Image (spheres, rainbow, N blue to C red):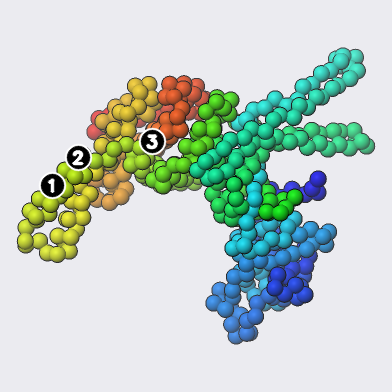
Amino acid sequence: MRKTEFMLDDKFEVAGEWWLPETQTERLYGTLRYSPSEIELEVSGTFEDVPLSDQLLGSSKFKDHACIYGLTHDRQKFTLLRAHAISLSTTTKYSAFHVVADKHVPGLGDLNLREVSFYCRHLDVFIARGLFAVNTEGQKEDFKSLTVQYVQPPKIEWRIEEIGSLLAIQTLLNCSSSPYEQWHKLHARSFVTITPDSPQNLDWFIRQIWRFSYLLTLVTDEVVSPTGVELFLVDDKYPGWHLYKSAKGMNDDEHVTPVFLFHLGHLLDNFGRMLNTWYSVSETMLDAIHLTMDAQRNPEHSIQGRFLLLAHAVEVVSRATTSSEYMSPADYEAVKTAMKSAIPVIVEKAHRDSLKKKIDYGNEYSFHKRVKMLIQSLSPAAQEIVCRDPTAFSRGISDTRNYYTHFTDELRAKSLSPVAMYWASEKLSFLMRIVMFRYLGIDEEVIVKRMKGHHRLLQRIFSSKEHPECKTGG
């Protein structure tokens, strides 16, 4: 059992000897400091071979180091990956993109992994396993005994063909006690393991980890991120801990149980199919997912910024899931040729080229039509969640998006006010949830029931109805 776990949200500082793999005998003393936003190693001396005249911050003479190895005073191994000097004087500070704790590993170009396990926020609540049975004999002053029985739950495993991998969810028990202070602690924690058919590089695994985290963010309606990552090299029996820089640490209270939109129990029969669909989406659908996740996971966007992200997500998901053309491409070719030929000869070349480009895209649906058709593709009950009037709503979204794209006086008069735009963003987020759930194969009646029964979404759905859907009417 490990003495230390290295989780992504933790901060730590370790001191010891540090060296480059190619010069193992030339070791420097220094301190590694890790936080979710910074990985910094400060050593006495330098690994750089730079003349004094070139010892300037940001000097082009500084090179990237694929690896810097470390060994702490208590014999714990560390590897910094993609490190580079950020200051150089009597001590040198290095910044790195990755740290691997408990292992000396090769550089990213040679780092192949057989599997990765990761913990993520809210996973235990999502899978909702009953693990402990408590039996007592007697009460209060008659209390005689306490029995806690733990039953190891089975591993749940699915095959994901698109990435040629097995994805498994497991739960293991940790126990600790103090016979002198007379306390005992049992804690079960769940984690996900991805095992590909053949070894893959670190970037590949990071993409799969975040794709899974995005799926849980969607189905739970809570922000789900990895909290700890363990790497297994090809011939490893014991893993190393992977740490990397993230934007910031999470601030949610671990002791507050979230209320999820869906638990695994709601989806278990179809979860394997959902995973395969999620991991095999087209590049266009993946763009829509990234836009939606950016809007949903980052609370620091401005009202305008969040609106534009979600409006763009709706346009992209329309391209990914519905027809996008007024007429067949073959029929439009004749129209396109006729329109280009009709451009007057007095139009100068740059203007002519611009008009021809507009004609090339003239067969694609307008943004207003895309939004309206996407809403009209929903059941009446699902439409009711999104808006009151699909025509007015799609017009308001289109006019507002156009203004914040072009900023003309004419468009300003048609755009929604900041308050109405905030609630329009909420409605767009309802629409994206429903469309993506439907894409994953969840029945629309079930989607509506879960969304209308979710305390946070229900309040937002109700409040959004009190605001105009477009500048004129709605």
Which mark is in front, 2 or 3? Answer: 2
Q: Is residue 79 rendered to the left or right of residue 394?
A: right
Give the residue pinned by disc 3: 428
The numbered disc on residue 124 is: none
The structure residue drawn at horizontal position 87% and vertical position 14%, both measured from the top left corner, is 138
The 10 Å Cα crowd at callout 3, few under 14, some 14 to 19, many 20 or more, is many
How far is the residue under mark 3 from the one under mark 1? 34 Å
In the foreground, 302 or 114? 114
Please tell me whether mark 3 sits on a helix, a strand or a loop: helix
Give the residue pinned by disc 2: 327
Task: Residue 90: give x, y in percent of width and height.
Answer: 71, 77
The 10 Å Cα crowd at callout 1, few under 14, some 14 to 19, many 20 or more, is some
Please tell me whether mark 1 sits on a helix, a strand or a loop: helix
Q: Of all residues shown, which one is farthest toward the right?
A: 180
Any part of residue 168 in sight: yes
The 10 Å Cα crowd at callout 2, few under 14, some 14 to 19, many 20 or more, is few
Q: Is residue 462 rendered to the left or right of residue 56?
A: left
How far is the residue under mark 2 from the one under mark 3? 27 Å
Disc 2 to disc 3: CB gap under 8 Å: no
The structure residue drawn at horizontal position 60% and vertical position 31%, both measured from the top left corner, is 126
In the foreground, 87 or 70? 70
Give the residue pinned by disc 1: 335
Task: Residue 376: give x, y in percent of width and height.
Answer: 30, 28
The structure residue drawn at horizontal position 38% and vertical position 36%, both measured from the top left corner, is 428
How far is the residue under mark 1 from the one under mark 2? 10 Å
Disc 1 to disc 2: CB gap under 8 Å: yes
Task: Residue 185: give x, y in percent of width and height.
Answer: 81, 34
- Does 122 appear above or below 347? above
The structure residue drawn at horizontal position 64% and vertical position 36%, both measured from the top left corner, is 169
Any part of residue 121 in sight: no
Mark 3: amino acid: Leu
Mark 2: amino acid: Met
